[in-house]
């Protein structure tokens, strides 16, 4: 035995020796995978080494957590600065604008059936009906925006009637329109 420190000790004795709670002793023992050597006694040097190693790990974890806290505080500060400089838009304003846009789109699209109904009887075949509907949809979309409605690089009025595949028409594997 070295001074007052025994070679093996029970958890209660280890608690008194280290000033650590029983739960903490058990956690250190379990984490290190230590097994009792004599009855319910553990090798003191092994337990002390486990406690030291676990505290080092805890210390590293705390250091990482502090770094993360500092990073998040910096982000919060940047957000506050951007807010004060008027670089951020409140969510409420964005939601309000989106509601307006969706409502306008909904209202415009709901007029399609009554606007297109008179044209459909004059159409000859599914392809022509499909073009009339696409034209009505594109016209509605263009009315909702300041920019011309495009698909890829092509402006819609130039595309209309040229190639239904670029407009998103459902097509069979052979390239024919599903509406035929």
Image (cartoon, rainbow, N blue to C red):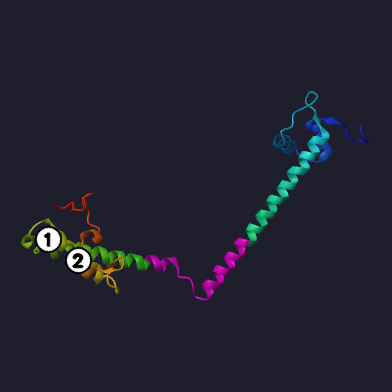
Magenta portion: prevailing SS class: helix
Task: Left or right? Give the position of 65 relative to 134.
Answer: right
Q: Residue at x 82, y 40 (%)?
A: 18
Front-lying residue, 68 or 12: 68
Of the numbered discs in the image, which one, if any, rests on residue 29? none
Labels 1 and 2 touching (C-beta < 8 A)? no
Q: Quadrant of residue 107?
A: bottom left
- x then y, percent, for residue 171: 22, 52
Residue to which mark 2 is pinned: 160
Helix, strand or loop for disc 2: loop
Q: Position of residue 111 (x, y in %)?
A: 18, 64
Q: How many marks?
A: 2
The picture places residue 126, in percent across and down from the top left corner, at: 12, 56
**Label 1 crowding class (10 Å Cα cut-off): few <14, some 14-19, many 20+?**
some
Residue at image coords 27%, 72%: 148
Outermost residue, bottom side: 85
Residue 128 tag number: 1
- Which contiguous range is marked in magenta? 71-95
Q: Is residue 147 left or right of residue 15?
A: left
Q: Residue at x 52, y 72 (%)?
A: 83
Pick the front one: 10 or 54: 54
* Residues at marks 1 and 2, CA–CA distance in whole angstroms: 11 Å
In this picture, is 131 found above or below 48?
Answer: below
Q: Nearer the viewer, residue 138 or 127?
A: 127
Classify residue 46 as left or right of residue 117.
Answer: right
């Amino acid at each position: 035995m070295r001074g007052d420190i025994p070679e093996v000790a029970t958890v209660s004795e280890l608690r008194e020796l280290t000033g650590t709670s029983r739960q903490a002793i058990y956690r250190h023992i379990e984490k290190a995978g230590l097994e009792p050597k004599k009855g319910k006694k553990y090798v003191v040097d092994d337990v002390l080494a486990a406690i030291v190693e676990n505290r080092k790990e805890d210390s590293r974890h705390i250091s990482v957590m502090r770094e993360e806290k500092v990073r998040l505080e910096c982000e919060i500060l940047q957000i506050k600065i951007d807010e004060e400089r008027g670089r951020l838009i409140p969510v409420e304003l964005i939601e309000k604008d989106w509601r307006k846009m969706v409502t306008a789109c909904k209202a415009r699209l709901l007029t399609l059936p009554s606007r297109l109904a008179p044209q459909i009887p004059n159409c000859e075949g599914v392809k022509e009906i499909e073009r009339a509907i696409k034209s009505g949809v594109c016209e509605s979309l263009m009315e909702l925006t300041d920019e011309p409605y495009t698909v890829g690089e092509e402006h819609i009025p130039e595309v209309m009637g040229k190639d239904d595949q670029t407009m998103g028409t459902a097509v069979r594997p052979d390239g024919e329109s599903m509406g035929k």
